[in-house]
Amino acid sequence: MKIVVLYGTETGNAEMLAEDVAAEIGGAHDVSCRNLSDHAPGEFEPDALYLLITSTYGDGELPASAQPFAARMAAERPDLKGIHFAIFGLGDSEYHETFNGGGKTLAALMIAHGAAQIGERVAHDASGPDLAEDLAFPWAEEAIALAEGRLGEAA
Amino acid sequence: MGAAVSGAVAIVGAGPSGCFLAQALLKARPDLCVDLYDRLPVPYGLVRYGVAADHQGTKAIIRQFERLFERQGARFFGDVEIGRDIGLDALRARYDAVALTAGLSEDRRLGVPGEDLPGVMGSGAVTRFLNDHPDAAEPGPLGRRVAVVGAGNVAIDIVRLLAKGPEELEGSDLSARAAGWIAAGGVEEITLLARGPASSAKFDAVMVKELGRLAGLRIEAEAEGEGPAAEALRAVAGRGAGPKRLVFRFGAVPAAIEGEGRVAALRLASGEVIGCDAVVTAIGFEAGDNLGRDALRAGAEDAGRGRLAPGLYAAGWFRRGPRGTIPENRAEAQEVAAQLLADLGPGRAAPPPPPGAVDYEGWRRIDAAERAAAPSGRCRAKIGDRGAMRALAAGEEVSP
């Protein structure tokens, strides 16, 4: 399967996790990993699965490297019908009012432009007991399993 | 590494800026030898000793830095002070490039009469004590009324730690000694004094909102004007019914600290006198002396790009002054790394470790001992003594 891991990062934690996820699933699939700041909305392809990993920064906002992407989405209004993505958010429940705001915002942005979310949004809590990869690896495997047979079909 | 090494870079200061710089260098050039020196036997600088004990989520960037040492091949040489144990010139002679990321460790002074009275303390000294820094003495007693001077996140960190109840410190690594100092103060009233208006306050909105959730606190703020800090202040003003009172005062310029033998009051430029038992200044930081920061910067050939002299660079607070959060320092470290790599010619092999340095394996032993000693409700019990750190690093048994 063609899989693109896209990450939004501010302090580098989401970037490290994205690289780990790409390495974990890389043996069995055609995987690439890129920063959302380097990804244009027009580059989404229907035959790929997009694994989106983003942190949350400030007052529940998207991290710095996802903000240019969000701005381009708003400006270009791409039609993402037929595009499949799964979403994993990093956050800190110390800030519970805005916990995982970045993941919520990015998923909503994709759906608003017609993309289809695969599986549930999974949220990691920096103040919790789990390591991010212990949640993210099963999340990625689940998304890949759910995406089998769905990619390239009309949404 | 060995024969594959094609250049050696020393980084002075293993805090977040130094670690992000090393990360960026090794990501671009995995063949480089990158050595991080720190005057303490332990790495991570302000992530360990500046980020508040109850902000463990922010400290999670340490996982990136662990990877730096465990997979990217960086070496840690702790307990080595450049300028004392090894001269800066001697270090430069051993490496192709040296980057100074030693931060700014001295509290900036208010510059008003009475500043040296007992009961006046700098935020750096307080923060280091609250984080069990080996050089931090216990500050004098706090007392019932505390004035905090400053309009940045460090001031908010101090207010929050003074205001939190025991259950709100669950999961932190605040030590019993630090918690005992706060509790012994019996703080009832905190006045935060900011020189400018609320609209120019440098607090992050999310930090202000966090105060609004504390069970023991009631907040008063007359915050006018635009901006996220002012809006967040208006959102939390009037919140809470706790026994501790927090008052934000804007446009409050300290003119003198008054008292006989210890702090009794803070006098503002307006003539108003605010009674208080302790004053914590949180108005920024300055360099300690031994790296000769001022002279290096004065002679800098291209300080704008972080280059002080051929083969000598600076990043982080040491370069820019005490402004900018962790992500800003990461972005800057990446820029300085790009400049350093662009300048780097064919390089030399990794120099031998300096004698007596605590290496990364030594730090791992300290880290493991600290985690194992964590009491109930805490994630870690920091070792606050250099001798014990050295002994643990050397693999000796140390009784807690």
Image: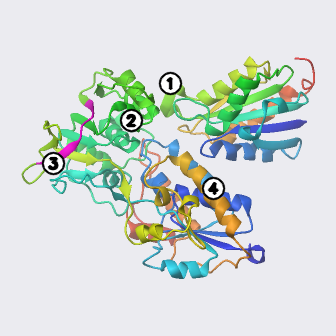
Q: Give the number of the disc on residue B200.
A: 2
Up-down relation of residue B287 to residue B10 (above or below): above
| Amino acid carrying mark 3 in the image | Ile
Up-down relation of residue A135 to residue B225 (above or below): below
Instruction: Inspect the magenta stretch and tell me whether residue B19 lies in it.
Output: no
Label 2 neighbour load within 10 Å: few <14, some 14-19, many 20+ = some
Task: Tell me whether marks 3 and 1 sit on the same chain.
Answer: no
| Amino acid carrying mark 1 in the image | Glu
Write down the chain letter for disc 1.
Answer: A
N-terminal of the pair, mark 2 or mark 3, is 2
| Amino acid carrying mark 4 in the image | Glu
Cβ atoms at labels 3 and 1 below 8 Å apart: no
Mark toward the viewer: 2 or 3: 2
Label 4 neighbour load within 10 Å: few <14, some 14-19, many 20+ = some
Cβ atoms at labels 4 and 3 below 8 Å apart: no
* Label 1 – label 2 distance at C-alpha: 25 Å
Relative to B283, is B342 on the left or the right? right
Q: Give the number of the disc on residue A97.
A: 1
- Could you say which is closer to the camera, residue B21 or residue A17? B21
* Label 4 – label 3 distance at C-alpha: 43 Å
Residue to which mark 4 is pinned = B335
